[in-house]
Amino acid sequence: MGKYGFIYLVFVSLLFNCEQSKDVNLTNFTHYVNPFIGTDGPGNTYPGATVPFGMVQLSPDIGIPGWDRIAGYFYQDSIISGFSHMHLSGTGAGDLYDILVMPTNSRFSKRIADNNYKPFSRFSHNSEQALPGYYKVNLLDYGIKAELTTTARTGIHKYTFPKDSLSQIHIDLGYALNWDAPTDTYIHVVDSTTIEGYRKSTGWARDQRVYFAIKLSKPFKSYQIFKNDTLATNPVEAKNSKIILNYTTTDDEVIILKTGLSTASIEGAYKSLETEAPDFNFEAYKEKANAIWEKELQKIRIKSSDDNQKTIFYTMLYQSMLAPTLLSDYNGEYKGANDSIMNAEGFDRYDTFSLWDTYRAAHPLYTIMHPKRVSDMINSLLSHYKETGLLPVWSMQGNETNMMIGNHAIPVIVDAYFKGITNFDVALAYQACKESSMVNSRQLDTYKTLGYVPADEDNENWSVSKTLECAYDDWCVAQFAKALNKTDDYNYFLNRSENWRNVYDSKSTFMRPKLANGHFIKEFIPKEYTPYFCESNAWQYVWSVPQNIEGLIQAVGGNDAFEKKLDSMFSLNPLPEDKLPIFSTGMIGQYAHGNEPSHHVAYLYDYINKPWKTQKLVRDILKTQYKNEPNGLCGNEDCGQMSSWYVLSSLGIYPVNPAQGVYAFGSPLFDEATINLENGNTFVIKSINNSNANIYIQSVSLNGKEIDRNYITHQDILQGGDLVFTMGNTPNKNRKANMALSSKIYN
């Protein structure tokens, strides 16, 4: 077994002895995770091995491009072309797939154009397994069993070969898929068990650099190295390079290949190997990865008699931790957004910040579960600012992709600050937020001048969405300024946060595109998907004023008018002839759960004293939009946002205004959930009389005292205690409960 396996067993034994009183039916949290959820349909997730927020995502690649295979894998496919070390989780962006490894032998040599004539093998889901930190599959055409596991910065492959005189391992740096394309690759054979090099590429992120060091448990007897598909001599530097390692294997012979990565240097890649994977004990690494996941999943314990619900919950909790991803190596070095090698001093540098998606629920969830890691994430955002002069919009692999809209690093920073996560330079953080809001790029020049982003009828510019997202960010800057006694800045940005009013059309009661001359566009159908709204329509974006929901209610015409409009949102179903774009999925009327702008809308009934409507809708979404099957997500997972919505909503809470420190009540799904906080406290959420029929809150108590509000604060959670919902099968319309003012910070 080895010392790592023994330590793991001792750890698990102690852990579960301490926890036996909580749920006697629960044996292992990782047992409930199903990494295949989202690998079919629109989810775009990968099933391979990784650790929480790790640099390496070692996963199978089908090898065929296309939207369905954005994450490299698609459940409906039947071939595998290899295993690459880096993947994105549910982004809809076809990038990464670095350093493809594929074992082969003499049994099969067919090639097909669809995967660019790369080696491949058929596989069956019957001989495939995925667990947190582990993936296994049989490559049927070769009779080779492939197993994968990882540490934070290394990928470990275990290949079990049949007897063959021409067993091979292909390492292909020229392999590319979807948007990805190599620009410069390098392979150097150091000795018969060591290979080093790099792969530089462009794609969604324009300047990506991955340095690697590979160690093998068995020396190869010979090799062929290729430069742009031509046989060459060692070493090779080219746009397209690969190497084939030749072996003679006996029956059931195991060869371990381990790959250390760095975005800064080959030396950094060796350091990853030396520190995280010093030997070839695959089982020990697999067990350690499982233990790491177990520790993170232990942070929220749920009680439920429904194993299917447990699987969905713990899979969503697992998927919430697949991004952001580690960027810095053990030396602290990383490829910076200024294209220089930088050093993270005193923190781990992260990237893969899908902020337009994740500021809404994922980052608020991290402030509950991972506050220590959040401080590293904030320092990472500030590093990007120091490197470029701006906070990131959508950053990946030390690059700004400029995908999507808004300055949503701002609410992430402000939320962390008000929640007491201040292990970062607060003055620098405020400077970064303010300066990123005052530049003239990203159409902020016209936004500052006109008070809105004007519609451009000739080019796609998402003008309405940009105005609304910027106004929310402005509110966040204003609250930050107020806390730091910067009164002039507070007044300036608070005034800007009301810019949503400049695109609100009182006649249609929608946010409507407005031209630079101050006139609304003439042709306007709210349910149409037009270039004026970012991946949405006017129905989905009219609610995007989380900083002043009360003001929006009044603008629409008061509580009754607002309720009718909300009702219409969830009942105005698309017609068969309506053209729905690829991102309009999970539709309930005009509500699209498969895309982020809708995610807070079901909770808005809380603000007009009709919380039972929120409770029914949230429970319906939890039950219908998430399933324990490969096609179990109704839209892109989006780096943790879709899964974080589920985690928080199933607990009965959700941050409508993500930087406010407030969680609105929905309808808790489980009989009991215990949040084990990093500060040592526990916060327990109990649901009395909970069932599939009893979806309505009858009463709520906090620490034994009944409360007359439809929310709790972040500070309530941090202090620990018990939140108890009493549930029933009919709405309690007599319960008078207040909702937090959306424009106020609760810290």
Image (spheres, rainbow, N blue to C red):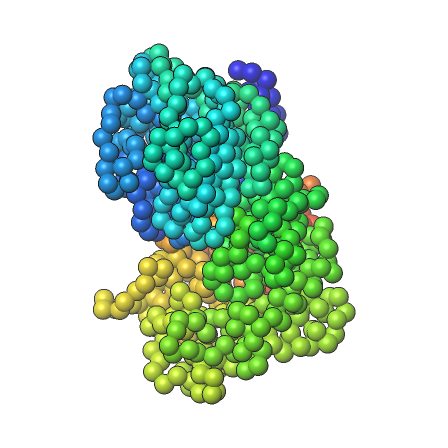
Compared across the picture, whether 564 is left or right of 430 comes to left
Please state the horizontal and vertical placement of residue 484, each as a whole percent of the image: 75, 66
Query: What count of labels does the image hold?
Result: 0
Q: Nearer the viewer, residue 104 or 356?
A: 104
Please state the horizontal and vertical placement of residue 583, each as a whole percent of the image: 36, 59
Give the residue at x 66% y 62%.
Answer: 432
Give the residue at x 54% y 44%.
Answer: 325
Please state the horizontal and vertical placement of residue 38, each as a whole percent of the image: 38, 45
Residue 420 location, quadrant: bottom right
Q: From this viewpoint, is residue 44 visible?
A: no
Give the farthest residue toward the right: 485
Q: Nearer the viewer, residue 83 or 658?
A: 83
Give the residue at x 41% y 42%.
Answer: 239
In this rendering, the answer to whether 446 lies above or below 152 is: below
Please state the horizontal and vertical placement of residue 666, each as a whole percent of the image: 50, 58
Give the farthest residue toward the front: 233
Q: From this viewpoint, is residue 574 visible?
A: yes
Image quadrant where one finds the C terminus: bottom right
Give the residue at x 34% y 12%.
Answer: 251
Residue 311 location, quadrant: top left
